Image: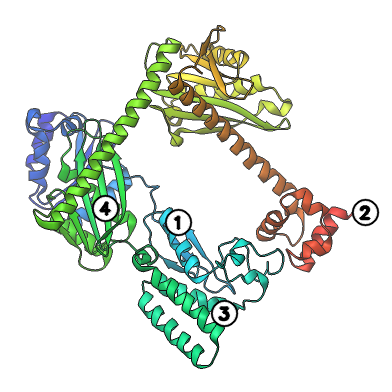
Amino acid sequence: MTREQLKARVRKLPMQPGVYLHKDKTGKVIYVGKAKALKNRVSNYFQPPESLNAKTRQLVSHIDDFDIIVTDSEFEALVLENSMIKKYKPKYNILLKDDKGYPYIRLNADAPYPEFKVVSRPAQDGARYFGPYPGRVAARRAIDTICETLHLKTCSRVFPRDIGKERPCLNLHLGRCCAPCTGKVESAEYRALIAQAVALFEGDAKKLERELTEKMNEAAEELQFERAALLRDRLRAVQKLGTRQHVVAGGFAELDVVAFVQGQTRACVCVLHYAGGALQDKEYTLFHLTGSDPAEVLSSFIKQYYAARGAVPKAVLLSHELEEQEAVAEYLSSIAGRRVELAVPQRGERRVLTRMAEKNAREEIERREMQSERRHKSLELLQNVTGMAALPLRLEAYDISNFAGQDTVGSMVVFAEGQPKKSDYRKFKIECAANGQDDYASMREMLTRRVRRYLDGDEKFTPLPSAFLIDGGLGHVRVCKEVLDSFGLSTPCFGMVKDDRHRTRALVAPDGREFGISATPALFALIGRIQEEVHRFAIEYNRKLGGKKVRGSTLDKIPGVGDKRRADLLRHFGSIENVKNAGEQELARVVPRNAAKAVYDFFHKED
């Protein structure tokens, strides 16, 4: 559709709120926006190019068509816009990573000896959940704080099943655990401690302090001085939580400060979390943006950030005014289930907070740009040492792994601009290895499959790298060269050669030339890191396949042994061989007696 045709369509748009979807020539949605008045907002895209910022000019150059959805209010348009962004993931919208996640703490409250665990999200399973928390580290810290305060267990043992099976750990002797493993702590007593932990997770420390004080005084009056001393110590521990209470109490801060800063090559949104007037945590989100409207970036960020988080503080302070600030505030209030204040402070203490967030964002940009510059220098060194024509911005490394000649697998890892790009990692089950171990044949098969997928137009294997790096010496890299030649490709390839101490010492070209890297620390570190990563990825995949094979061929064949009992046996004995060598009485300490007999009979039926 021509520009004039697009303008003619814009003139017919209604002056009503709604959502618009810009599309490219293929019909793909490349941008989703919302408007208080569709006609006015969409017409802004078709002004003279010089009046648009760089990002908008690039977007407009790809617009071939657009659709609109009319809504009853600006708030409905905002909610619909967020939904459409999640659905289409348009190229020109601000997109937050879906894998961020805000974990919860799960309590299996019905168990005889309940325990707290960090989980990704709540489930409808009857358990109790606390949170969400800013991250797994914060959630784990909350559990550790509670366990330290109330002397709850921190080990992975399951009670009452594991009572008396092993000696108590060091935590008992250090006075950090009440040690239910000894069998001296009844389920009711332990569950009473868990109830106190729940009070702390719910932010009701004062109530718990009153209860402990009453119980301590009662014990003293009844001359139960040992119990009174125990309650006194527990009370002091709860009181010491003090400012750490925010770590435990689930949810988030009372106040968030959100600031946007644009750097030379990227932009950053910094979020500072405050509780009780003190800074508790901070988060950074980096974008590769230039010339973007701060209000647009902040608006998109806030809507996606708090929607994914599922929790909003009482107030959110911003560094820039939003075009639809009232609608965004209403949207945040709908997530929180109460009124949320959204403000842009101009003076006073609140303005000091937004300046601090801006400063943190600016420093993070500078730090990342320095890191990026160092990585860029390493890539320049690689280019100069090997004589590559272009800067190797994308490197792919390959390795073969097998276990005793079986379960041969291949791994492909990708480093983009000197950093691992795990979304592009690929695994290969090697088929030719069924006829015996042959590393060269396995490497040939893996590379052939990789290049063919690229030539077939598979997006998962696009683009080709700037260079192929092969874990191995001259023979392995020559196999790579043969594969590339067979497809008429001239991409550079090098073998990563190790020394006697298993460290990468050089790169070798297919013609036998070696390029030493050990004297260049930055390049030595880069290639060493790539080689370790591709080896790790191959070994990890090989072990996974091997573990499935062992489990599927042995324990799963035993009547009465399901997933849980199989896991319990392997966790306790460490291997199939140890399970096989265990006596029936030993097995009965881990699984019920009838299952123990079935396992023992299975491995000793010939006897």
Tell me the residue at 51%/26% (across/down). Answer: 528
Tell me the residue at 8%/43% (across/down). Answer: 12
Q: Nearer the viewer, mark 1 or mark 4?
A: 4
Height in image: 541 above or below 505? below
Separation (CA) of disc 2 from disc 4: 68 Å
Tell me the residue at 26%/62% (across/down). Answer: 313
Pointer 3: what residue?
189
Provide residue 475's location: percent of width, then percent of height.
62, 14
Q: Mark 3 packing: few (<14 Cα in 10 Å), some, or many (20+)?
A: few
Pointer 4: what residue?
272
Height in image: 479 above or below 296? above
- Whether residue 305 sits left or right of residue 122 in the image: it is left
Q: Which mark is residue 607?
A: 2
Callout 2: SS: loop
Provide residue 396's location: percent of width, then percent of height.
48, 25
Pointer 1: what residue?
120
Callout 4–callout 3 Cβ contact below 8 Å: no
Callout 1–callout 4 Cβ contact below 8 Å: no
Q: Amino acid at mark 2?
A: Asp
Q: Mark 1 packing: few (<14 Cα in 10 Å), some, or many (20+)?
A: some
Q: Earlier in the sequence, mark 1 or mark 4?
A: 1
Pick the front one: 529 or 311? 529
